[in-house]
Amino acid sequence: MCFVVNLGQSMHYIQAWKIYNTKSAEDISLMSYIICLVLLIHWLVYGIIVKDKVIIIAETLGIIGSILVIIGTIIYS
């Protein structure tokens, strides 16, 4: 289960890789990634409250990936 959940968060890293590799964030919606980051933070807080390691790991990975995309979008837009 943990593998599948973490695999879902890999989309952020794939997008970040594309942004930094091409030095372009032309087709990226900054607002959608900011909303995604807020939602990931809410899920992380929930995971901490219920003490669910899978949720905590998955959302932490998602937060890091989203921040990478947001930074890349700001730099290369």
Image (tube, grey):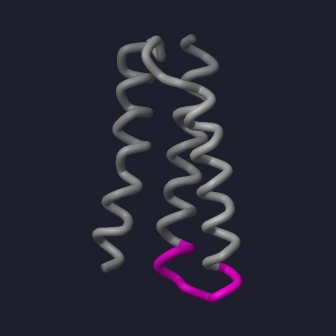
Q: Is residue 37 above or below residue 75?
A: below
Q: Is residue 59 left or right of residue 20?
A: right
Question: What's the residue at 70%, 71% (across, down)?
Answer: 45
The percent coordinates of residue 63 (x first, y second) are: 58, 53
The percent coordinates of residue 47 (x first, y second) are: 61, 78
- Stretch of the chain drawn in magenta: 48-56
Question: What's the residue at 46%, 79% (across, down)?
Answer: 54
In the image, residue 17 lies in the stretch drawn in magenta: no
Image quarter where the N terminus lies is bottom left
Residue sticking out furthest to the bottom: 51
In the image, residue 54 lies in the stretch drawn in magenta: yes
Q: Is residue 1 left or right of residue 71?
A: left
The percent coordinates of residue 11 (x first, y second) are: 36, 45
Question: What's the residue at 62%, 55% (across, down)?
Answer: 39
The majority secondary structure of the magenta stretch comes to: helix
- Residue 68, picture quadrant: top right
The percent coordinates of residue 7 (x first, y second) are: 31, 60
Q: Is residue 24 above or below residue 21?
A: above
